[in-house]
């Protein structure tokens, strides 16, 4: 999923890190050039400098290809302008905007291009679920917080797992395959799902190491 986030404050940074870690293509925009430079070496998302209210900046950030845009600046006026541009000029399918002040929340409607308004009191988890339209990512994050880890491995061209089903893979105890990314498309696999070269497999496990998971899928 391609996601553009306007605003690299604490909330924007947290969303970018979480969404990038769960295999989304994330671009973060902010008008603080010093902050942008610091974040470029800190988070895995792409970070660009500019005013997200400027259509040229949104285009540079990939708004024309975006599946989701999240307006998460600390300024409600900016969030509304960004939302309107995203919907009207770039036809972004899903626009999520944060209302920082309760008295402004009535403005956050489809008239301003907002598909999903969220209040300043919304938790990070609920905001991510609203943005992606999926509980799966949130569920994985909760599992991680409860002590389980998310491990990713890519099926190489020499892997013995090619052509096998998920049920045929001998996973370490306490491990499950949560998702398979194939050509950029996420799949929630059942036991009959057949693995192919290039598949990126996300495994949730209580105690397995990266080496354990690599052995299960690569040997």
Image (spheres, helix red, strand yellow):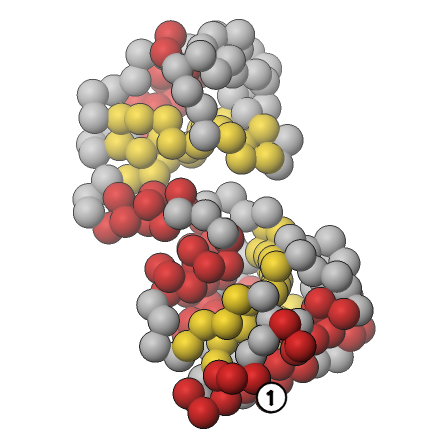
Q: Position of residue 39 (x, y in %)?
A: 51, 68
Using the image, determine if residue 26 lies above or below residue 31.
Answer: above
Work out whether residue 135 or residue 105 is closer to the camera in this orientation and state it. Answer: 105
- State whether residue 60 appears in this view: no
Q: Which residue is mark 1?
A: 77
Q: Position of residue 19 (x, y in %)?
A: 48, 53
Sort mark 1 into few (<14), some (14-19) or many (20+) by Cα contacts within 10 Å.
some
Q: Residue at x 75, y 61 (%)?
A: 91
In the picture, the quarter occupied by the C terminus is: top left
Q: Is residue 47 left or right of residue 149?
A: right
- Picture quadrant of residue 70: bottom right
Q: Residue at x 34, y 39 (%)?
A: 150
Q: Residue at x 56, y 84 (%)?
A: 107
Q: Secondary structure at mark 1?
A: helix
Q: Position of residue 207 (x, y in %)?
A: 20, 32
- State whether residue 139 appears in this view: yes
- Picture quadrant of residue 85: bottom right
Using the image, determine if residue 196 lies above or below residue 119.
Answer: above
Q: Position of residue 103 (x, y in %)?
A: 45, 92
Q: Residue at x 77, y 64 (%)?
A: 90
Work out whether residue 210 or residue 202 is closer to the camera in this orientation and state it. Answer: 202
Q: Could you tell me how many numbered marks the image carries?
A: 1
């Amino acid at each position: 999923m391609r996601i553009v986030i306007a605003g690299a404050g604490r909330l924007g940074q947290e969303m970018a890190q979480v969404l990038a870690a769960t295999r989304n293509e994330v671009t973060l925009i902010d008008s603080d050039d010093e902050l942008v430079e610091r974040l470029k070496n800190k988070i895995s998302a792409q970070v660009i400098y500019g005013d997200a209210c400027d259509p040229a900046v949104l285009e540079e950030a990939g708004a024309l290809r975006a599946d989701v845009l999240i307006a998460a600046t600390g300024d409600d006026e900016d969030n509304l302008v960004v939302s309107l541009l995203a919907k009207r000029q770039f036809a972004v399918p899903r626009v999520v905007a944060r209302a920082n002040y309760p008295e402004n929340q009535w403005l956050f409607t489809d008239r301003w291009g907002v598909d999903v308004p969220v209040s300043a009191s919304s938790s990070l988890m609920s905001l991510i679920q609203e943005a992606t339209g999926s509980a799966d990512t949130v569920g994985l994050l909760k599992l991680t917080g409860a002590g389980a880890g998310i491990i990713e491995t890519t099926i190489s061209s020499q892997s013995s797992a090619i052509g096998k089903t998920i049920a045929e893979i001998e996973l370490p105890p306490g491990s499950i395959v949560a998702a398979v990314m194939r050509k950029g498309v996420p799949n929630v696999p059942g036991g009959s799902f057949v693995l192919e070269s290039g598949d990126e497999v996300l495994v949730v496990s209580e105690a397995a190491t990266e080496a354990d998971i690599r052995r299960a899928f690569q040997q």
